[in-house]
Amino acid sequence: MPSREEIIEEAGAWLEENLDPNLSLVEWRSRLVDGGWGSPRWPKEYWGRGYTTEETNVVTSLFIRKGAVPAASAGSRNLAAETILACGTDDQKKRFLRGILTGEDFWCQLFSEPGSGSDLAGLTTKAEFKDGKWVINGQKVWNTSAHHADWGILVARTNWDVPKHQGISYFLINMHQPGVEVRPLRQMNDHASFNEVFLTDAIVEPENLVGAEGEGWAVAKTTLSYERGGFGTVSDIECEVEKKGRLYDEYDEEMREANEPYVWYPQRQGRVDLAVPRAQATGTIKDGAVRQEVARLISMKRGAELAARAAKAKVRSGSNEIVSAGSIGKLASSFVARQGAKVHTMISGADSLLKGEDSAEQGVIAEILVSVPAISIAGGTDEIQKNIISERVLGMPKEMRADTGPFRDIKRN
Amino acid sequence: MELTEDQIQFGEVVERFMADKSPPTVVRKLMATEEGYDPAVWKQLCEEVGLAGTHIPEEYGGFGFSDVELAIAAAAMGKHLFCGPFFSSAVMAGCAILEGGTDENKEALLPGIAAGTTIATLVLDSLDKVEEVGQKVTADGDVLSGQVPIVIDAHIADTLIVITADGNGYALFSIDKGADGVSVRLRESIDETRKTCEVTFTNAKANRIGSLDIVGLNRLWDRLVTFLTNEMIGGAKHLLETTVEFTKMRFQFGRPIGSFQGLKHRCADLLMELELAKASAEYAALCYVKGTGEPYVASMAKNLAGDAYTNIAIAGVQLRGGLGFTWEEDTHLWFKRAKGSEVLLGTPHYHRERMMTIIEEAS
Ligand SMILES: Cc1cc2nc3c(=O)[nH]c(=O)nc-3n(C[C@H](O)[C@H](O)[C@H](O)COP(=O)(O)OP(=O)(O)OC[C@H]3O[C@@H](n4cnc5c(N)ncnc54)[C@H](O)[C@@H]3O)c2cc1C
């Protein structure tokens, strides 16, 4: 195992030689990924270095300080990558992982359906094997990024005569084909980051089935654990160099354009960072009731970060608590976000209604209020997290089930 | 908090001792006595485990461990509602002397406290707000006067450590409980697992043993708060666990009550609340040791833990139904400790206000 100093020395030397602000974004990321620095936690044979999380953090901090643009990781592509890494074939890893890290391929998650969200395993999108290919028919919904995705991770039913969890298979689907139609959906906060996706005789090549036929539920659970595990991460490291050149221009452009539908994401977490500055600017910091709620907000936010960190430390040292840690962290982030919305309402009063350039924080405060409701729904609702925590962590008895037996016979929407 | 092998072992030793010596039957017996503790067990704890010297440097007869070990011990004591003068003597008085005593007085006072042969306590004339410390007891030279409504374990203490206002800072005194002009009256409290007394000084001659500036007093307060908070976490965690176990065994409507979603979700919420408080409490201890972290960590941890423990205690009674409201059932012992800990050294409300003051000063 390399020491901290050895990692810094090796990564530092590599950066010295390779980081060039005049490269294009894809050129730079190709170097980064081929050099094994795009995701050092991954195994050596798949563009990584086999580092532990801790060792990877050393690299991440150094790269932030040196102004190195990171590998692409935002959104569903991360879920796809981790799932392929954990459950995919060698061939799938070789074909997909690099394009994810370089940012050349954008991914989306095609899980939820109009008839099944929380009850994901109740899905009815159909996959049939015909003439050597999988043919997909059905509808997906609430699919973030689907409108500019190149690939999707998809769950579909391949067997209707077995209990519901046993008839599901997991696919990697090319979004650029006639059988895939994506329609953006307008959200209550007036952005459109999620979509509905219609699948009509859409094709998946046989080599893009992940795991065996009928064993997709276990693969889907892997995806979900990464979705929930991603909450509560923070970085307060600052960059030491001036970010100037083509690389940074293209990166900014990516952030602006590709991420345009997601500008509201920080707002859905309640913008805890704005609480004290806003309370000071408005003078409400003198209001005892506001002070109580701001302090409560900061305590909850920091407590959630510390709990997430403690949970990760445990997972590192070998215990199997990733699921519980993820669900507790996700539930906490909902509580924090709602408290954030409450605090900003107290601080801004009637002004919190106004949108536009001349409103409180250029509309950001208003956007908090109408974005926070997403966080307790997306990625598994609060109620589902509480079911998971009570059953898997606290060991409380499971709900009585009304959905056993062959899927064909179960009541559904 | 990532613990070292030694720290884990230390925790196991304390946990074993507490589980063995402080089961609910013993807690009930001791809380009904006037002394409120078992001198033989206290002696064993100090001689065999050496616990009272955990955080006291070796030069003063202790082990010189850090406040992380102190926090570990706190959690075990809180879990088992340990009845004994650990908090009052080793922590409150011990830390006050460590933070403010002169070297000479540390040498004189700490070895007895570390060995458990001297029981001391700290007379804090406000257990509500650090800003109000030093207002009820006044010192004229080294002669003390004034009345303090709540002093933990004063009735069994040999020595009282007293903090009074002194110019811009504070003076630290020690005085024998039996000295002229000192009177101690045991008070009735809802939490009989932690005995409280009223202490009155009437022209009582004390020894000046040191000083604290405002920063020092706040550091001491934070240190005591951090210990108490970790003690609360131990109790809260245990109470949530026993409550959840109860819901798995109790049947109504032909099924365990723990299968009702209303109760499952309530327990999940409580676990989340507990996890945030626990991580913060452990972090506060670590920050004290390293001298790092946000300046408000202790207040942050105490306000989270105060709410979490009380909420868990309320659910602990509620989820047991009528049984939970009986004297016979043990839940009320933790309920009362939760209430007692919530209000000692500052309510959650106070600590949130204190956080804001600290944040404003820093910005
Ligand atoms: C912003 C956003 C982005 C999203 N992005 C994606 C994406 O990229 N890909 C994707 O596949 N999906 C995505 N989703 C969908 C999301 O995962 C689902 O909306 C969610 O799982 C809930 O499913 P549902 O909408 O069908 O609601 P339902 O499952 O119908 O739930 C309705 C209500 O019933 C409650 N409920 C359901 N079951 C239970 C139970 N057993 N016990 C107690 N209460 C219960 C729920 O908590 C909820 O309050 C996104 C959603 C949002 C809001």
Image: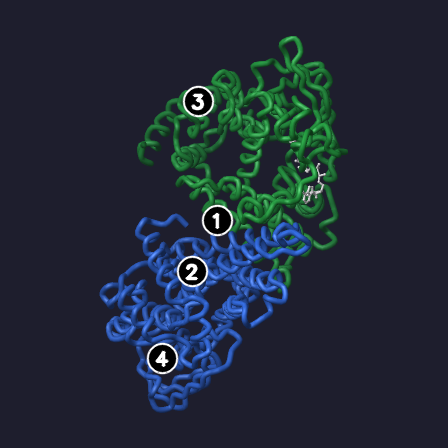
Q: Where is residue B2 in the image (x, y as percent from the top left)?
A: 39, 48
Same chain under badges 1 and 3? The reply is: yes
At mark 4, the secondary structure is loop
Chain identifier matching the green colour in the rendered picture: A
Find ligand 1 in the image and state its quadrant: top right
Q: Visible in this render: residue A291?
A: no
Q: How far apart are marks 4 and 1 (CA)?
A: 38 Å
Give the drawing colour for chain B.
Answer: blue
At 67% across and 37% down in the image, what residue appears?
Answer: A118
| For residue B252, side relative to residue A298 (left or right) | right
Q: How crowded is mark 1: few (under 14 residues within 10 Å), some or many (20 or more)?
A: many
Which residue has dot 4 on it? B157
Q: Visible in this render: residue A386?
A: yes
Same chain under badges 4 and 1? The reply is: no
Which callout, 3 or 2, points to the residue nearer the camera?
A: 2
Which residue has dot 3 on it? A47
Which residue has dot 1 on it? A306
Q: In which chain is the residue bearing label 1?
A: A
Q: Residues within 10 Å of mark 3 (few under 14, many from 20)?
A: many
Which residue has dot 2 on it? B75
Which callout, 4 or 3, points to the residue nearer the camera?
A: 4
Amino acid type, mark 2: Ala
Q: Where is residue B334 in the image (x, y as percent from the top left)?
A: 51, 66
At mark 1, the secondary structure is helix
Amino acid type, mark 4: Ala
- The colour scheme used to paint the residues is by chain
How many numbered discs? 4
